Image (tube, rainbow, N blue to C red):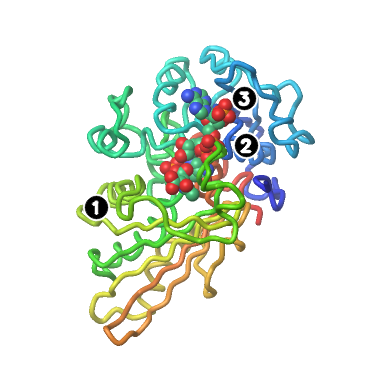
Amino acid sequence: MAVFGLWTADCAVGCNNGGMTTRAAILGPTGYAGAELIRLLLGHPEAEVTYLASHRDELPDLRVEYPRLAAALDPAVAVARPVDPGAIAAAADVAFLALPHKASMSYAPALLDAGLRVIDLSADYRLSSVELYESVYGVEHVDADRVAETVYGLPEFFRERITADTRLLASPGCYPTAALLGIVPLMRGGLVDPASLIVNAASGTTGAGRSAKVGLLHAEANEGFAAYGTIGGHRHQPEIGDVLEVLGYPGVDPLFVPHLLPVDRGILATIYGTPRAGVRLEDVGRAFEVAYGGEPFVHVVDHLPSVKHVAGTNHVQVSFRLAETGSGSRLVVFVAEDNIVKGSSGQAIQAMNLMFGHEEGCGLMGV
Ligand SMILES: NC(=O)C1=CN([C@@H]2O[C@H](COP(=O)(O)OP(=O)(O)OC[C@H]3O[C@@H](n4cnc5c(N)ncnc54)[C@H](OP(=O)(O)O)[C@@H]3O)[C@@H](O)[C@H]2O)C=CC1
Ligand SMILES: CC(=O)N[C@@H](CCC(=O)OP(=O)(O)O)C(=O)O
């Protein structure tokens, strides 16, 4: 399973080499997101993996779990240790929680109390209200007081909130990252009828995590392609709407339809909307240029992007078309990202860079 790189980052690109090192702990290192954090941090010239924490009784050796890591992982770190907040705080500055939702919120308070800064890759702190979280995830939030104050770690739209003062950061969902990068410029430009927006997205199988599921067996998923879940009821549907509301677009709730794509990694989101009267292709181009002209990781391209163009990287490719049909104009936006890099672990490191004073692209600029 090719979770690990198709390439190795050119580590020096995008770093200030100011001599500072951020020490990172990873909870959930045996999962796909955790392992990808290890891979990316091993290539980060200003970060160091100092503690891998597992809940297993028999603590895993990451060189055995992911043999590709054996070449680079410090033997003193490779065997995971227990989830002991005091010991983690002694070894690290930041704890990445690469854990399922519901598990993260049970660990975050003790880690924060121990003095760590926390970057949570799960959904536990992403939504803006406890009520919304509890209705979507069907459980009581055990750390409710922190929900409203947590920073949503999508730098392209919340960069000014991701700072040296950020103690708890919720890294965005993989599908919401792609959907929001495609939709927000359209909303800012007033280019589409919000009620017409549909997000049709397909994810590689690593998006479903590493635990065994029948639908992810090679014989079930390979050579197939289908939508899944409850259409309009996937847990990322409310995350997309909630972030749009926070950004000033209340009531915009694009229909989200997820599909399982039989590749290891990658998401392609195809976003449809009805353009407002008089909107021209140049208007759309200008809106994306304004949004992403200065962004290190979001690239507006002419070609139709593929998951293959961004696999293994923190880069996102965005393209758009205005199509004339017998029943009127349709605006179509295409967003390609790697679900476990820009969709989770890379994006989490992008946020870490901002939180700890590294150049935003440090360790992530390679293609
Ligand atoms: N995969 C992706 O593309 C993306 C993932 N995410 C999010 O990142 C998080 C991790 O995802 P992913 O790596 O795919 O998931 P995996 O299922 O692959 O990994 C989960 C990890 O969490 C550990 N774990 C499970 N339950 C507990 C617990 N109660 N206490 C401590 N550790 C636990 C697992 O350990 P063990 O091996 O022992 O079971 C494993 O290391 C999830 O919240 C996911 O939604 C976000 C965006 C994209
Ligand atoms: C293919 C697949 O199953 N994908 C997952 C979403 C990916 C994920 O990890 O969810 P978060 O981004 O919220 O953490 C799903 O549909 O539930």
Reading the image, the residue beneath label 2 is 35
- For the point 30% across and 27% down, the residue is 141
Q: Nearer the viewer, residue 222 or 72?
A: 222
Name which of mark 1 and mark 3 comes first in the sequence: 3
Disc 1 vs disc 3: Cβ atoms closer than 8 Å?
no
Query: Which is more foreground, mark 1 or mark 3?
Result: 3
Measure how far apart labels 1 and 2 are at the Cα level. Answer: 35 Å
What is the residue that sits farthest to the top in this orientation? 86
Name which of mark 1 and mark 2 comes first in the sequence: 2
Helix, strand or loop at mark 2:
helix
Q: Amino acid at mark 1?
A: Gly
Reading the image, the residue beneath label 1 is 248
Kindly identify which numbered label has been placed on residue 98: none
113 in relation to 7, above or below: above
Kindly identify which numbered label has been placed on residue 52: 3
81 relative position to 246: left or right: right
Q: Amino acid at mark 3?
A: Leu
- For the point 30% across and 29% down, the residue is 139
Can see residue 96? Answer: no
Helix, strand or loop at mark 1:
loop
- CA neighbours of label 3 inside 10 A, class few (<14), some (14 to 19), many (20+): many
Mark 2 residue CB less than 8 A from any atom of ligand 1: yes
- For the point 20% across and 54% down, the residue is 251
What is the residue that sits farthest to the left in this orientation? 251
What is the residue that sits farthest to the right in this orientation? 71
